[in-house]
Amino acid sequence: MRMTALAVMACLAVAGCGTVRIDPTGPDGGSAGVDAGEAYPIDLSEWEGVATPDDLRFLREIAKASLGEAADLDGDGVSEVTAARLEDGTTRWDFDTLNDDWPMMTAERLPSGKVTLAFRLNQTSQVNAVHVYDGPSSTFEWNDNLRANYFNRRETRLLDEVAATLTIRRETRATESDAWVPETAYTLPSTLEQPAPASCGFPPAPDVISTLPPAPSGAGITFSDVPGYQCSPEAKQKIQRAYVCALRKAMNGCLLRRNSKLAVELLGLFVAKRTTFLASCEVESCDGAALANTSSAYLPLQGGGRLGRIRFSPNKLNTGGCAGSEDGNWCKVMLHELLHHTSARMSPDHNSAALYDDLWNDQVESCAADCAANCYAGSACEGKAKPGELCAACAGTPSEREACGYTEEKRVTGSVCPNLDLCHAGLTGNALCTTCVDWAFVDCLQNPLPGSERLFHCCLECPAGYDKNDRPCNTTMEEFGPRGGPGCDKSPDCQ
């Protein structure tokens, strides 16, 4: 009997759970392949001299996890990723990146290649989101209220490889018994670029690798060997450094603090989905074109993996283009491209310069800019967002949004007046307040933080003739509780 990711969670604490542990060693010093039972050596020879010894260890741990071994990502001697094989051939991983009592994510990969990710975002056994990847379609379901026991949001993504489009549909519902109601739908090109003029971009590309690798690359990225698409040694090293930087920012750095769900989901991209990216350096079609782009389409690899595409502009890599040649900028570009392969929100304007007027609806760019680059040093989003706003656009849970900064907001309302006799008219008697002002702590995108949505502040207006007001609004706020907040001009340090 096949156990789904949700069913597996019920027996995580029970020894055995109908599973067999994967043998972590394969012949010839390789690692046991989790799908075909074959051994693939982890080859990081191309990274020696480019990556630091600690970075090499980090890449090797990710590769070990994808092949069914326990992995210690931060080098503290404790495995954040464990793996097991179910009786039907399904492989299950537990990701405990925050070292909580419950794994933050459980992933299952069926022999068919279908992958399910189940997330626990409030450090309990409760599942708050489930993602299913099956061929060209992806479905994400979650609940905005982490304590609710049903999903009220759903997003589906459908890749049409013939039309080269990616269609995104979002739905919502108020209660578990309600039908799903369409919220928005739009279609983007399946090749997703760093924002650029619509007339610019990379030309359609033929195959840019002569022979598919026999299995997922140990590092998770490989390079084109076809003339016209090969990267120069200098560009290749810049891409390698950016790649390691982006993974570091995601898996045990900024993104893990900003949006822990996206961080662990990105880890699942390499481990459960066994993705290798093919990097190529191609001449773009006009000046000012995209720095890089990535494709939503994949080629299957032996051993159950898949090959994605990331294309880079060689002249931008060599000169830095309009965004500067610093490694930090390319770290941001790489993180941006990798996040395209997660459930990170994308604005309908993602492929245009208008994106920077809609950063709040685009986690791909806001997370990359916030975590891997200085958005305020001459880049396209300078002046478009305060640091705390960019941070909040990236953040996932309410506590992550609050960590970005918050302010106090007062609102006049007639619906939250307390059932108290705040208004008095001598012998006539007492009365309830007619109009009250409530207040809330709001995040940097003006969304109320949980627990402070409608807190009573003062009585703005009493009934006619009731001249004495026990809680007038000209009284200082300090008498009624805390005020203000850290504001949104300064984001937590992510560099």
Image (cartoon, rainbow, N blue to C red):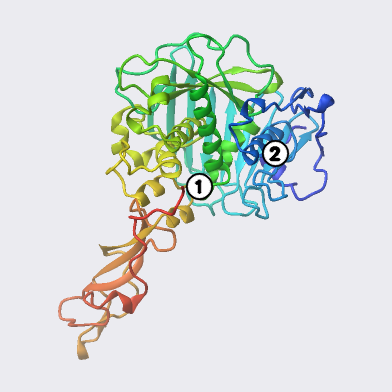
Q: Which of the pair 380/87 is nearer the observer?
A: 380
Quadrant of the image occupied by residue 433: bottom left
Q: Which of the pair 442/59 is nearer the observer?
A: 59
- Amino acid type shown at disc 1: Cys
Indicate which disc, 1 or 2, sits on the residue closer to the N terminus. Answer: 2
- Amino acid type shown at disc 2: Trp
Question: Above or below — where is 338 with respect to 395?
Answer: above
* Residue 298 visible from this viewpoint: yes
Assign a secondary structure to mark 2.
strand
Q: Is residue 115 left or right of residue 332?
A: right
Query: Residue 374, how many percent across, how many down?
Result: 38, 43
Quadrant of the image occupied by residue 402: bottom left
Label 2 neighbour load within 10 Å: few <14, some 14-19, many 20+: many
Query: Residue 378, how many percent across, how many down?
Result: 30, 39
Question: Above or below — where is 244 with respect to 144?
Answer: above
Query: Farthest left residue?
Result: 465
Q: Is residue 163 left or right of residue 146?
A: left
Q: Which residue is mark 1?
A: 254
Assign a secondary structure to mark 1.
helix
Question: Above or below — where is 400 with respect to 39?
Answer: below
Tag of residue 93: 2
Q: Quadrant of the N terminus?
A: top right
Residue at the image position 68 percent from the left and 35 percent from the top: 60
Residue at the image position 65 percent from the left and 39 percent from the top: 53
Label 1 neighbour load within 10 Å: few <14, some 14-19, many 20+: many
Instruction: Kindly indicate whether the residue at mark 2 contacts the one at mark 1 (C-beta within 8 angstroms).
Output: no
* Residue 181 visible from this viewpoint: no
Q: Is residue 106 left or right of residue 198?
A: right
Q: CA distance from mark 1 to mark 2?
A: 23 Å
Total marks in image = 2
Residue at the image position 42 percent from the left and 11 percent from the top: 204
Query: Farthest bottom residue?
Result: 427
